[in-house]
Every structure is written in C-alpha cells, then in structure tokens.
Amino acid sequence: MSAGGIGRGTDYAILFVGLVVLAGPFVWMLLSSFKPNAEVRRTPPTWWPERFTVDNYSEIFTRLHFPSALFNSVVVALAVTLGTLVICSIFGYALAKLDFPGKRVLFLLVMGTLMVPGMATFIPQFVLVSNLGFVDTYAGLILPGFFGPYAGPFGVFLMRQFILGLPDELIDAARVDGAGEVRIFVRIILPLCGPALATLGILTFLGSWNNFLWPLVVATSEEMYTLPVALALYSVGQNATQYGLLLAGAVITVLPILAVFIVLQRRFVQGIAMTGIK
Amino acid sequence: MTADLAGGRRRSEAAAPAGRAGRRRVWAPRSARSRQALVAWGFALPFMLLFAVFMALPVTASFVMSFTDIRSTDALTPWAVNLVGIKNYVRLLGDPIVRQAALNTGYFVVVCVPLTMACGLAAAVALDKGVTRLRTVLRVGYYLPVVSSIVAISVVWRFLLEPNYGIVNTALARLHIDGPSWLNDPATAMPSLIVMAAWRNLGFLMVIFLAGLQTIPAELGEAAQIDGAGPWRRFRHVTLPMLRPTLLFAAVITGIGYLQFFEEPFVMTRGGPLDSTLSVTYVIYNQFGKGNYDYASAISYVLFAVIAAFTVLQFRLLRPRGLP
C-alpha cells in the first residue's frame, strides 16, 4: 500500500489531537488542584503548579461534609451494584434457561420500559418515596437506584443475553445427576457468568456513582448528599470562584471511577460493544 | 439383563391396571416442570417486586397524574385529587416557555447528534486502521469524559470558558481574537453546551463504531481497492453502507439521550441566559420544583411520545437495506 504511510500518519495526528482535546482538561484539572487559588486564576494560565500545595485537599475535607458525601457515594454505589448483580443474574437465568408460565410477558414488560425517559418516572417515584418515608434515607437513595442508569432492565437484558449463550447440556447433565435448580445456578451458571457480571458491575457502579438528579432531589440534608450533589451545590453562589477547592473536589469525584476504569478498561469497552451491537 | 427387563415390565404391568404407575409416570415429569416454574418465579420475584413498585407503578401513575390537578401538597394524599381531563395537555400547547424549550431541545438534538457521530466515527476509523501503539492510552483518554461525573466536568469546563482568564479565551487572545463571554451570551451559550456534550459522548460512540467496523470483512475494502477506489470512495461506498446497522443504533441511543438533555444546562447555565439553554426536561424539573406535578407529568408524557416517534422514524430512515 503506497498510501499506507501517509494514511497512518494522518490517523495518528487525528487521534493525538483528539486525545489532547478529550484528556487535556482532566490533566489540567489534576495539576491545578495542587495550585493555590490565586495561581489558578492567573492570566496567562500556568500548566505546572509554581507553588505545589495540598491545601485544597485538606480544606475540602473540612468543608461541605465531603467525608460523609464520599462515604454515601461509596455505600449507595456498592449497594446498588451488588443488588443489581444478584437480582438481574437470577432473573436473567430464569428468562434464559427455565420454563415458566408468563415468561414472555414479563420479558416484554421489562424491556418495554427501557425507552421510558427518566423524567416520566421521576415525579411519581418521588411521591412514592415520600409516602414510604424514604426521603433523605439510604433506602430512598438505593431502592430507586436499581432502576437508574445501567441497572434494572438493562441488567436483566445483559444477563439474559449472556446466559442464553451458555450450553444447555451443562444444565441437563446436572439435572440428570439430580442437582436442584438453585444448586445448578450457584454451582454451574454463576461461575461461567464472570465476564457478564464484571461488565454489568462496572457499568452499574459507574451509573450510580455519577447519578446526579435523583440524589439531588432525595437527599435533603447535607449528611445524605452524595459526592456529585455535594460538589454541585458547593460550586454555586459565593463559592463559584473557589477554583482550587472545586478542582480538588472534582478530582476526588473522578478518581475512584478512573481507578476502576483503568484496571478494567478492556472488559469495560467489551461490555459497551457487547450491549451496543446486540 | 433380559430377566431384569422382563421383571421390570411385569412389575409395571401388574401395577398398570390400578392406573397408579401410569399416573405417577406422567405426574413425575410434571412435578419437575412445575418445580422448575416455581424456582423460576422465585428467581423472578425480587426483580419483579422492585420493578412493580419503582418502575411499573410510577410509569402508570405518571400517566394518570397528567390528567389530574395533583400538586406537591397532595404528595401524601395522592388519591384525593381531581380529574381535569386534557387540561394540562392543552395548557402546554399554548405555553411559550414549553415552546422555547422545545425549540432549544430540537436545536440541540439536530446539531449535536450528527456532530457527536461524526467525531466518534472519525476517531473509530482512525483507530481501526491498524493503530497498534498507544491503544490503551488512547482508549483511556477518549473514555475519560464518558466515565466522569458531569459535575466534575462542569467545574473544569466553566473554568475553560471563563471569559477573562479561561483557557479558551486566553488562547484566542494570542491569535488576537476577542473571545466572547461564552456562557453569558444567548448566542454562544447553546453552541458551547453542544460542543461540551459532543466532547463528553464521542468516546462512547467511538467504541460502538469500532465494534461495528470490526465486523466488516477486510476483503470488501481490498476488492474495492483493486477496482481502483481511493480511500474516500472506499469509505463512502463500502464502509458506510456496511456500518448502517451500527449507525442506526448509535443515532437512536444518542437521540434518545439528547432529547432528555438536562445535566449540561443544569450545571453550566441554569437554563439561561434568557432561557437560551432551557431544555424540555429542564422545564419538567422546574415545574416539579414549583410543585406542579400534574403539569410536569403531562410534559414528560409528551416528551415520551416524541422519543418514541423519533425512534420509529429513525428505524424507518436508517433501516438496513433488504430488511423489512
């Protein structure tokens, strides 16, 4: 290919420009979170911190209930993720491999809600949570979270599609050996579901961690804020120019997800492609 | 062996007249099947219970609420409200704020969906053509905006677009261009959010397109090359048609997401200046905040109908050729 060399050069050029545009702001965010506020606001802007300081980080933890927000975000995201993995994998298995009356109807019903906009369920969900007395509680943050981004119906679909691809012979052989249905699921199906569980787990954790609107409305006291809510409410009004502090808060909000992503990025991308193509 | 079989047969023959063995034989598999059904329902139960309470009930309730006069003060007595027919729907048709928000949302969707798709496709094609080095760095870098909280992103972007010492205007000043006050000017606020949304979502589409590109057989491109087609024509007449199903999927999910455009204006502009970035979802949120649950529900159902219509339309326009 004579044009190959030139083409490849252009490819790298496009990708490199894209990389600077997409990742550049994050690099700047990380570097600037170690600058004093005055340096962040200076023109022309500096790239490396002239005076390196961790004051922003120590200060953000003494203000705005940041430790409790961090704790709440972790608790809610873990609970939503674990719960989603359990209920979606057992339901997905039933839909994929077991025979029961009403199976088709249930599947269509659940899939039908995938297209419903979040805003259409938002208000009655809030009325419901108010009536259950769950406003400003972990239950109020977690239970509707099962139907938040990348959870609920999406999880059922993902698990069902994956388990459908597992060979029936495994299950039949176990039945012949006299294994019960629960035992078959726990001992045979679940160990094979690793890739699907990992993908769903990452996506659900990500969706819950970054979820903003629902916690904003349900968490009414500062003690129940999650990280995005705490950061968003702190960044308006008189604090809007506390750039150093806000950037430190932003780094803390992004860092856990980034860590999870870098470790599992291959699987993560596979998961997106897996759900995207089907 | 033979004796055994005979013995077995004799035994069953002996029992047959009473009909017990026959019944038992039918009954046994049915028991296994009904036990399976029971277990299956047990497996479905936790999800379906939560689904009924937190999804099916709200979707239905929201529809009913849109025909009532429910307000936030009725939240604890949701049964004690009056039916008002289609009053809320009539009201939204004549509401200038809703019309403004619908126009803004349309503007956002029509510009931002193609922009995001074009950027994502360019990145995917560049990455697909055998870029082997730095793949991991590129993947993490391109995916950073997708996995990051919109609130964290807004902190950085508000600073980038800051009129006096922000990085964008500082760079423009070097080129002797006087950059506008991006988020405070009604003419530039929406374009700023469009670029930001495309920036945030193109990594996701890149991954989808990359998976689609890898399903296209290399022989097709090679054959076209032998026939004398240049890179652009190969892309235009081989890659794009083969990518049609993936493009359809990407357009649909991006469109559904963008029609619900809310977070960007909420964290960046609060819908301003002069309502220039107010979206339909933002109006629903504002009406919810004012306690008008009836009106908010009606607007969200109209939005739902538009999303459904949009999805059907795109399936018709972009449906792969040869499929019904």
Image: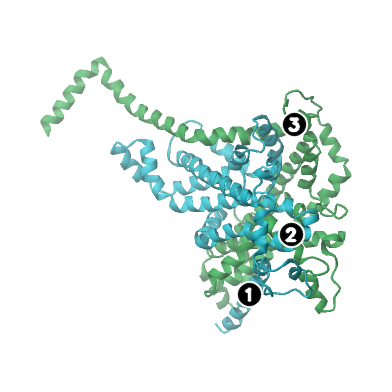
Chain colours: A cyan, B green
Query: Badge 3, how many Cα within 10 Å: few under 14, some, many 20+?
Result: many
Looking at this view, is A238 or A132 the one in front? A238
Q: Which residue is mark 1?
A: A16
Residue A81 visible in the shown view: yes
Instruction: Say which element carries label 3.
Output: helix
Residue furthest toward the top? B18
| Relative height, residue B236 to residue B90 (above, below) | below
Mark 2 secondary-structure assignment? helix
Q: Earlier in the sequence, mark 3 or mark 2?
A: 3
Please state the chain letter of the residue tagged with numbered disc 3 in the rendered image.
Answer: B
> At label 1, which amino acid type do we have?
Phe
The residue closer to the viewer here, A27 or A180, is: A27
Q: Given the image, on which type of amino acid does mark 2 rest?
A: Cys
Chain that bears disc 1: A
Per the image, the residue denoted by label 2 is B112
Q: Nearer the viewer, residue A104 or B196?
A: B196
Image x and y of residue B70, in percent: 78, 30
Q: Which mark is residue B65?
A: 3
Q: Position of residue B228 (x, y in %)?
A: 60, 79
Q: Residue A130: where, in percent of width, then height?
A: 68, 32
Identify the residue shown where x is 63% and y is 34%: B56
Q: Are marks 2 and 1 in contact (CB under 8 Å)?
A: no
Residue visible at 54% across and 47% down in the picture: A78
The CA distance from mark 3 to mark 2 is 33 Å
Residues marked 2 and 1, same chain: no
